[in-house]
Structures are given as structure tokens and as C-alpha cells.
């Protein structure tokens, strides 16, 4: 790094004489950067700065120690941004170029490619159209390097909606698309004159009663491959800036006037306050929110030989290996009603010496039951779970971890070694609820692929040998926080206030602590398109839960402050074939955590790896459920999902509601009727999740 810095310093010294001229030329083609309507005059300097990492900035700079106005930033790796800045972020019109020769010119918002603009790749791919948070979204045209062309609608980076694709060979498709594939009504016209006009599914023509178009046009279809567009190696929003004092060498300053909000005039209005604006070190800022960035120990105790549940773990792993190893069903995800038969009494015996169907083992004699095996196998397929990787995660050489002693539910929780899956022991009543709702649950997750409800991968039971004949029931779920970024805060949100505050002192709250409603001091702000998807999905999920008479569920939210990950290395993240992130726990040591580079970790989807902002809130009194917004914003990555969906409104919950209603405000307690619970939950969630401006 020192060599790079010296090289840049030599270069700057040689070019100081022409610096003003270059800057003047650069700014003549750019418009004035956006400033707030209510403003006061404040001095601004034109600066040239060389940062300790070799980066260079030339342009307008305000006393708060960040760019605001027109400026040019050159990274030491060769990337460059020239354009408008607002409070330390690229915002407005600008141009970003990569060392490969690729360029983007157009609109930026909070350092994201957002608005109308043109990307020209190094391989002659060109996209001209609309973007939302680095994704092609809306109307757009793409000319591919191989000569193919697409014009039409895009959604989150993929062809979606009405569009026309023209192959360089002369073939043409006009019609509907979904997630990058031909889907819906469409017309394919091949260059040889053949034509298919009809319905498409997953990129292929759908079969008819009298003919199979896929067989009829098999040769032609083999030539109709959708070309993959070139993607930037890194997006502007992923590039880091150093605005800290003392991190740069200043060159000639030219004072001028610029209008920017003063402190008094901002009163009552939201103001985006960057982390570096408020502290010279981003870690100080996060700690200023009461968030400790020190590494925390990995959760749980490894179940080794001698542990009281060691044999139970072995039994579970043997049973899972047996279940997953069974012959797979057909490729169809349509199940017969018999697949949901939960009254099947078939048990598999696992004697230590082995049997015709089971291997010998070192555990005790036990029996194993697999509930609705074909249903859960199909669910795993719907959730894109690879059977081999699923088996290795749960049944590999690594032991499970026991997360904690039983809580008020009496359940034990176990985590796989790679943090992908969580195993929970269940009460008989919970098993009954899951079995009852399984057909509806299957249809719901099949219909709504972005559902936020818990993903269930298997339901099993182990009957131990001996006089007690004890049964232990398990459900296997996805771990919502299986990610390669550091989760700084976890919240379990219900929308009720009674007892919904942590009983730990602040000094004992770390990244593993799960906070509650009255601990929440943020409003989550989602970009427009994501917010609309979020609202629609929450409504659908709550309709499902209300119909199934479920209550007492929560929205589990994980917050990763982007500033807490800036210094972490990004060499360990290699997404696997399931589309999930690698075996890195959010609570691992610093060397095991990667930085927030979306090209290196799982793709963004609703509730997973979502870039967003949080706005800090303050409460006027202790029991205020949602605090008042302060106007202080922080860039974050969000993870969230609806958990604990197996509690129905049974007689016990009705009695709990009646008892607590005499002592507390009935609207503040968790145990309420499912209809009332869903309404209260909905109102609360939509008060703490808002659309970002």
C-alpha cells in the first residue's frame, strides 16, 4: 500500500500545475448537485485529497468533512466516479468507470445505480434503461456482445413482463417473461419459418393434448439460448470511501458558497446523516448506538461423547440419513392427497447391530418415524435444497451444537455445524398443528415463493428404547441468520408491549442477544420496489396464518450495519449450489466474516441480504411502542422472517388471555384471538417498516 501511495503522490506532485484546469474542464459538463430546498449559505472548498490507501478525490468539499457538489473520486484499483455528490455519497448525475473499460453513465441515488442510465460493458454488452438499486428494473434495451437484442420490461435484473428477444441467428420471441425465462403467452418465430404461438413455462413451450411442441421443435429450441449479460465486477455502492480527518493530504483550496441545510432549519425534517459525518471512525458511530463491534463467541455447545444428548443426536443423524437416502419421487411438485396422510404408523427399527434396511451403529436401540416424507422431500425441492448437501449438513462428520437450555416452551434447539439448519424439539401439540396445516402450508409456499413464514424441511420422531419408550419429536427448519455478514442486532417483534423488553443490562447485550419490541430503536426503510413486495407478502402470509388460527408468531429481524463490515476481508465467501451463503456464522471471529460484496454472497431476495436504511428513533416514555424518528440514517443489510408459527389459539391460550386481561391492558398482551393478533401484528410491522424516500 505504501508503494501505491508514493506512486500516487509523485503523480499528483507532477500534475499540480494542471489540476485546476482539469477540474474546471471536468465541471463544465456537469449540472449543479442537488441541495435541500430550505438552506443557508455555508462555505465550501474545492480540494484535492490523497487518502492513505491511495485513493484520490478532486472536487467540492464541505466543512463536515465529505464531498457535496461536483467531484471526481479515483480509487487505487482504477475505478473512477465523476459527477454529483450529496453528503458524501454519489447522488444525481454521474459516470462510473471500471478498469476493464466498462462504464455506466446516468442517475445515482445514495451511491446506488438508480434511475435512468446506460451501462456499456467491456465485452460490448450495452443496456440502456431504468435501474433500481443496481438492478435493471423497468423499461430497458439490452444489446449483447454476441449480437442478440432484448427490448422490454425488466424486474430485479431479469427479463420480466412483456418483451422481445431477437437472436443473432434471426430467431425471435415476442411475449411474456418471468424471472429471465419465456413464461406465459408468447410467439416464437424461427429463421426457417417455423412458428409456435401459445403458452410457455420456464423457458419452454407447454405441451398440448395432441402434440408436444418441445419434441416438435427440439432442434430449433436448442438454438434459442438466452445470452447472459455482462455484470460489473463491483458496483459503485460497494466501493468504500475514507472521509475521516487526517486520512488525506489536502492540496489547493478554493472557497466558494453552496447552499446546504443548517441545523436549525432541519428541525422537524428528516436529514440523512452519514456515519462518517458524525464520527471520524465508523466503529465509534456504531458504538454510539450502543452496539459493540467486538467479536462474540459462536452460539451453542458442541454435542460430544459424554453429552447427555449425544446418543439422541446420533439417532437423529442416522434417521435423517435413512430418510434422505430413499428413492426420490417424480420431478413434479404436485402431490396426491395420500402424501399428506399423517396417521401412518410405520416405524423403522435401528438395532445397534444393523438390519436389512439400516446400518450398524454405536448408539442405543431406537425406532424412527418420518412424517409425510414425500411432502417434505418436495418442500426441500421447492426451497432449492440439494439432498446431498442437506444430508452432509445434518449428518456429516461434524457434530451438532445445542444452542441453549429449554426456554418457556420447553424445546431444545440444535444448530448444524455450518449454521444452515436449525433443529427444534417439539411438543406433541405443536406436531399436531403442523400436521393439520401441512396441506395449506404446502400450497402457500408453493404459490408464494417469497413467503416470509418459516421454511420446514422435515418432521421426525425418535422413540428411545427402554421401559420409558420416550418419544422425541423434531422439526428441521432453515436458519434465517445463515449469512457471511456480521449480524449486529437481532429483534423478535410481535406488536405487543407487555413483557416485551429485554431484562439484560446494556453491558450484557451482544450480537447474540435477541431484543424485543420495546428495545427497538429503529424504523426500517426499504426501497420502493422492495417495500411494495414486502407489504404484499406480509398481507398474504398473515391471511394464511389467520386462516389456520395461528397466533403468537413473531417477525425475527437481523440488522447488519454496513460500517461494521467495511474492514472485513472478502476472500472467504463462495456461494454454494443452493443459493445460500457458505459455512460462516454471523458470530464467528473476524477472520471468518466477509465484507458486503453481493457478487460474493447469496443473491438478494425478500427478507435475505436486503440493502436498506434504518432511521434511529427515541421514545418519549418507556411503554411507547414506536419511537419518534430522529432523522439519523444508517446503511444496513436486513434479514427477516416470520417464526414460531405452530401455536394455535387453543384452550390454554384462551385461559391465558382471560387471566392476563384482568391484570393488564388486553391489547398489550401476546395471547389474543388470531384475527386480533394478525391485525395488531400488521399495524405494528407497517409502522416500523416504511418506504424509503
Image: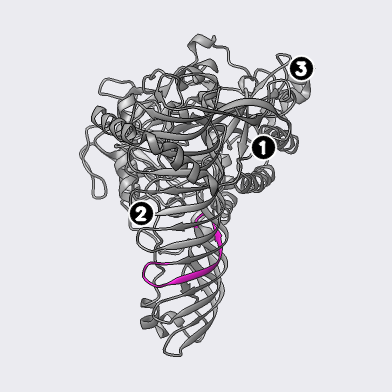
Q: Which residue is mark 2?
A: 101
Q: Report the mark closest to the observer, 2 or 3.
A: 2
Q: Pick the residue in front: 298 or 267.
A: 267
Place of residue 205 in the rendered image (x, y in percent of width and height, measured from the top left): 48, 76
Q: Pick the residue in front: 395 or 361.
A: 395
Q: Say left or right for 197 vs 657.
A: left
Q: Is residue 15 visible?
A: yes
Q: Report the mark closest to the observer, 2 or 1.
A: 2
Q: Quarter of the image holding residue 37?
A: top right
Q: Is residue 225 above or below residue 314?
A: below
Query: Given contact means CB atoms under 8 Å apart, are the residues at marks 2 and 1 in contact?
Result: no
Q: Which residue is mark 1?
A: 690
Q: Pick the residue in front: 490 or 350.
A: 490
Q: Say left or right for 504 vs 231.
A: right
Q: Is residue 470 visible?
A: no
Q: Which mark is residue 317?
A: none
Residue drawn where x is 35% and y is 58% of the image:
122
Amino acid at each position: 500500500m505504501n508503494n501505491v501511495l508514493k506512486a500516487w503522490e509523485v503523480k499528483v506532485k507532477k500534475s499540480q500545475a494542471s489540476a485546476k484546469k482539469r477540474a474546471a474542464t471536468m465541471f463544465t459538463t456537469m449540472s449543479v448537485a442537488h441541495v435541500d430546498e430550505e438552506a443557508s449559505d455555508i462555505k465550501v472548498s474545492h480540494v484535492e485529497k490523497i487518502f492513505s490507501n491511495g485513493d484520490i478525490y478532486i472536487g467540492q468539499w464541505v466543512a463536515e468533512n465529505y464531498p457535496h457538489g461536483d467531484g471526481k473520486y479515483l480509487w487505487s484499483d482504477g475505478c473512477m466516479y465523476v459527477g454529483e455528490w450529496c453528503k458524501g455519497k454519489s447522488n444525481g448525475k454521474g459516470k462510473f468507470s471500471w478498469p476493464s473499460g466498462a462504464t455506466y453513465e446516468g442517475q445515482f441515488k445514495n451511491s446506488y445505480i438508480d434511475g435512468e442510465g446506460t451501462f456499456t460493458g467491456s465485452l460490448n454488452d450495452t443496456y440502456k434503461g431504468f435501474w433500481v438499486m443496481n438492478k435493471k428494473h423497468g423499461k430497458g434495451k439490452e444489446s449483447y456482445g454476441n449480437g442478440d437484442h432484448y427490448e422490454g420490461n425488466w424486474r430485479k435484473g431479469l427479463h420480466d413482463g412483456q418483451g422481445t428477444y431477437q437472436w443473432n441467428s434471426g430467431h425471435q420471441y415476442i411475449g411474456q417473461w418471468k424471472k429471465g425465462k419465456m413464461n406465459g403467452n408468447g410467439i416464437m418465430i424461427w429463421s426457417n419459418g417455423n412458428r409456435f404461438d401459445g403458452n410457455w413455462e420456464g423457458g419452454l413451450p407447454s405441451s398440448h393434448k395432441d402434440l408436444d411442441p418441445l419434441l416438435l421443435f427440439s432442434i430449433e429450441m436448442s438454438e434459442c439460448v438466452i445470452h447472459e449479460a455482462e455484470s460489473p465486477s463491483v458496483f459503485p455502492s460497494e466501493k468504500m470511501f475514507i472521509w475521516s480527518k487526517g486520512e488525506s493530504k489536502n492540496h489547493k483550496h478554493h472557497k466558494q458558497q453552496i447552499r446546504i441545510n443548517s441545523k436549525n432549519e432541519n428541525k422537524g425534517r428528516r436529514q440523512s446523516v452519514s456515519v462518517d459525518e458524525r464520527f471520524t471512525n465508523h466503529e465509534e458511530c456504531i458504538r454510539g448506538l450502543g452496539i459493540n463491534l467486538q467479536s462474540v463467541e459462536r452460539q451453542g455447545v458442541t454435542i460430544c461423547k459424554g453429552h447427555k444428548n449425544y446418543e439422541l443426536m446420533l439417532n437423529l443423524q442416522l434417521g435423517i440419513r435413512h430418510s434422505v437416502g430413499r428413492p426420490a419421487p417424480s420431478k413434479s411438485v404436485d402431490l396426491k392427497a395420500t402424501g399428506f396422510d399423517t396417521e401412518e404408523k410405520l416405524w423403522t427399527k435401528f438395532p445397534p447391530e444393523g438390519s436389512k434396511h439400516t446400518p450398524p451403529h454405536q448408539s442405543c436401540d431406537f425406532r424412527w418415524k418420518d412424517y409425510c416424507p414425500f411432502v417434505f422431500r418436495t418442500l426441500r425441492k421447492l426451497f432449492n435444497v440439494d439432498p446431498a448437501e442437506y444430508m452432509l449438513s445434518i449428518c456429516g462428520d461434524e457434530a451438532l451444537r445445542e444452542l441453549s437450555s429449554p426456554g418457556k416452551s420447553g424445546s431444545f434447539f440444535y444448530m448444524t455445524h455450518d449454521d444452515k439448519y436449525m433443529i427444534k424439539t417439539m411438543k406433541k401439540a405443536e406436531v399436531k398443528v403442523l400436521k393439520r396445516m401441512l396441506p395449506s402450508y404446502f400450497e402457500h409456499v408453493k404459490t408464494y415463493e417469497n413467503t416470509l413464514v418459516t421454511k420446514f424441511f422435515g418432521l421426525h420422531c425418535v422413540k428411545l428404547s427402554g421401559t420409558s419408550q420416550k418419544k422425541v419429536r423434531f422439526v428441521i427448519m432453515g436458519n434465517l441468520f445463515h449469512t457471511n455478514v456480521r449480524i449486529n442486532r437481532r429483534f423478535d417483534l410481535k406488536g405487543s408491549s407487555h413483557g416485551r423488553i429485554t431484562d439484560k443490562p446494556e453491558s450484557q447485550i451482544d450480537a447474540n442477544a435477541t431484543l424485543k419490541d420495546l428495545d427497538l430503536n429503529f424504523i426500517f426503510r426499504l426501497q420502493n420496489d422492495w417495500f411494495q413486495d414486502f407489504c404484499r407478502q406480509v398481507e398474504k402470509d398473515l391471511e394464511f396464518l389467520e386462516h389456520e388460527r395461528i397466533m403468537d408468531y413473531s417477525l425475527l429481524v437481523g440488522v447488519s450495519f454496513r460500517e461494521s463490515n467495511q474492514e472485513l476481508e472478502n476472500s472467504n465467501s463462495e456461494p454454494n449450489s443452493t443459493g445460500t451463503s457458505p459455512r460462516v456464522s454471523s458470530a464467528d471471529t473476524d477472520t471468518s466474516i466477509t465484507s458486503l460484496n453481493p457478487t460474493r454472497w447469496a443473491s438478494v431476495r425478500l427478507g435475505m441480504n436486503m440493502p436498506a436504511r434504518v432511521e434511529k428513533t427515541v421514545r418519549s416514555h418507556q411503554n411507547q411502542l414506536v419511537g419518534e424518528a430522529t432523522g439519523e440514517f444508517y446503511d444496513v443489510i436486513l434479514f427477516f422472517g416470520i417464526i414460531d408459527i405452530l401455536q394455535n389459539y387453543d384452550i390454554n391460550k384462551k385461559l391465558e388471555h382471560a387471566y392476563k386481561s384482568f391484570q393488564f391492558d388486553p391489547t398489550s398482551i401476546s395471547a389474543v384471538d388470531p384475527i386480533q393478533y394478525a391485525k395488531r401484528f400488521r399495524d405494528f410491522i407497517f409502522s416500523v417498516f416504511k418506504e424509503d424516500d
